[in-house]
Image (cartoon, rainbow, N blue to C red):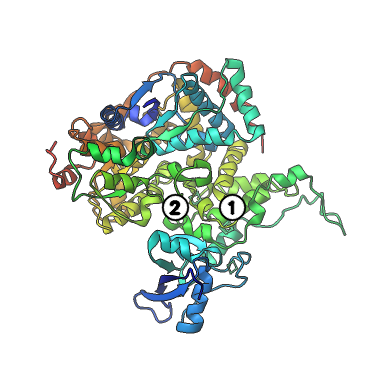
Amino acid sequence: MKLAYYPGCVAQESGRELDMATRWVCRALEIELVEFPSFSCCGSGFVDEANEVLNLAINSRNLAIAERAGLDLLTICSTCQGMLTLANVRRRDPAVRARVDAALKPIGIEYRDSVHVKHLLRVLTEDVGLDAIRSRVRRPLAGLRVGAFYGCHLLRPADEMGWESGEEPHAFEDLLGAIGATPVDYRGRVLCCGFPIQFVKPDTASRIAGRQILDAKSHGAHAMATPCPLCHISLDAYQNQAERAVQQPLDMPIFHLPQVVGLALGATPEELGLARHLVPTEPALARIGSSSL
Amino acid sequence: MPADAISAKFDVRRWDAVAGGAPRYQRYELELAPHTPILSALLRIRDEVDPSLTLRYSCRSAICGSCAMQINSKSRLACETQVGPEMDRHGRIVVEPMRNQPVLRDLVVDQSPFWTQYDRIEPHLKLDPAHPMPEGRPTSMTPEQVERFKETPRCIACAACYSACPAVEADAAFPGPMALAKLYRFVVDPRDHATQDRLVRIQPNGLWLCLRCHLCTEACPKDVRPSERIRDLKEMAIAVQGGTERGSRHAIGFKENIEDRGLLSEAKLVRQTYGAAGMIGQLPQGLRIWRKKPEVLHKPRRIEGADELDRIYEALDRESEGAP
Ligand code: SF4
Ligand code: SF4
Ligand code: FES
């Protein structure tokens, strides 16, 4: 399998461990990643707030880059997935399409709507398949109870994202089961991490993050895992503030999606960049008998 | 009993604000056809099994908006949600009152927080005094003008979206999805004279607290799509007022941030939103993160074809700078 790799901004800088883990897992599963130094930021939902058509145009440009190479596009971020999918979906409105295309045409870019935008979670569960993953597991995450945390834009609006149920998805839990972990069922798994208003009203954002972590914890999660690096920032890098907001210790290790998969496929914590997390992951690693960092 | 009847198990949250005490979940089991609406099942329980079960309903056909409640954690109209799919997915049907509004008894909530927020957006036309509504006949609108309302006139005020909204749950100041969708409806009404004022006043503790999580859009039984109309309001608010709020500054800052190099510069974004002075407050957290992730201070590389991005901005970002 060969895909255009769209790492997004965070995985190229402060979330490099996500990029490391993605490359490791894709190498192990023989997914060839083709890189394009011309991809821009997806706008992260903020450009969409400021200027909807501009957001669609910059992402149509991204899609056109993959299209020229004849490749579908792999995302590793729920928000990138959402924004790039929106560019595909909203173009169905002829008026929007006309404005987007009018901005792209003078610079010689034409997008013909052929690129499928796929998040790594979807590629793993549908294209690689759970059986193939199961057969490659070298270190089942047995005994590790993991709360999947989806990230809004991967799922919703479900009629536009065109994949899982917006409120009752199961792909991530299926995958966690396939790598030997025990998925934890909790309401917060489909809720928001608070990230979009981290800059607007930090207390409220942290309360939101804290509640979801508490919810996972009260349902017995030893760790959480997310397919979104922005959720990872809220849940991991800002977990200290979430603790303050809910006035309780949380101590919840937060994994990126390819990190949990990588651990099961035999990667070392170093290869997955686990030492870069703010909340130590050792307690979770100890449960699966992985070597410490 | 229908041939395809299933054994449906309901766990209904029971509580009474007057009696107090701890809430309990009561199990009821009924043989039902899979297509039975959950409201009908609850009414059968009330009529045949337990007359003390308290719930609110009226039309039984998804019109009045009275019967919203949580069904297996989703905010739904009980009269249009069927028993079968819920049993298939969850093996039981947990029925609870809506969230974000105080419970009075069992499935009945006090909707005043929802209606207070609705009042806050002043949901009535404010006409230009110089052009009052003509006597004796309604003002007409063109089909294009009506089109601008999008799906907002479909709202039945059921509060399912309000119940589903995590911003409401975390911050009582937030007006909630329905009130904001209604605000949109007045902002785009060509007869309304208070558009700018409405957009200015809804920003503090309002518009910019929306998480764009789209849970409201998922919950809404009438496909009003509040989250998308809130996005529209944000863009319009920026057009009338620019970056006066942290939220609008952040959105504008982000847009300008990536225009530069094509990728996000994280440290610069913090400065754009908080200003140089405000950044001091961010220092301790920034340092904590920097120790593990020194790249937060990196300037990202400039993407290939950054000039293309410039031209796209030139074409599309100038045209948006008019009033709505
Ligand atoms: S999109 Fe905004 S209004 Fe809708 S549920 Fe999420 S936070 Fe609430
Ligand atoms: S927007 Fe939808 S969910 Fe919200 S009150 Fe109106 S009809 Fe109900
Ligand atoms: S009873 Fe009227 S909407 Fe359900």
Q: Quadrant of residue B280?
A: top left
B311 vs B52, nearest the viewer: B52
Checking the image for residue B223, the label placed there is: 1
Residue A230 in which image quadrant: top left
Residue A6 position (above or below residue B215): above
Name the spot of residue A263 as percent of width and height, x first.
21, 38
Chain at tag 2: A
Disc 1 chain ID: B
Q: CA distance from mark 1 to mark 2?
A: 15 Å
Above or below residue B94? Residue A139 is above
* x and y percentages locating residue B116 in the rendered image: 56, 63
Looking at the rendered structure, the kind of residue marked 2 is Glu
Q: Is mark 1 within 8 Å of ligand 2?
A: yes
Query: What amino acid type should be assigned to the residue bearing mark 1?
Result: Asp
Q: Which residue corresponds to the image point at 63% horizontal and 48% vertical from the top-left? A: B184
Q: Tell me residue A8's x, y (percent).
A: 39, 29
Q: Secondary structure at mark 1?
A: loop
Q: Which mark is residue B119?
A: none
Residue under the point 43% across and 77% down: B17
Residue bearing the label numbered 2: A167
- Quadrant (top left/top right/bottom left/bottom right) for the C terminus of chain B: top right
Judge by depth and name the residue closer to the eye, B64 or A132.
A132
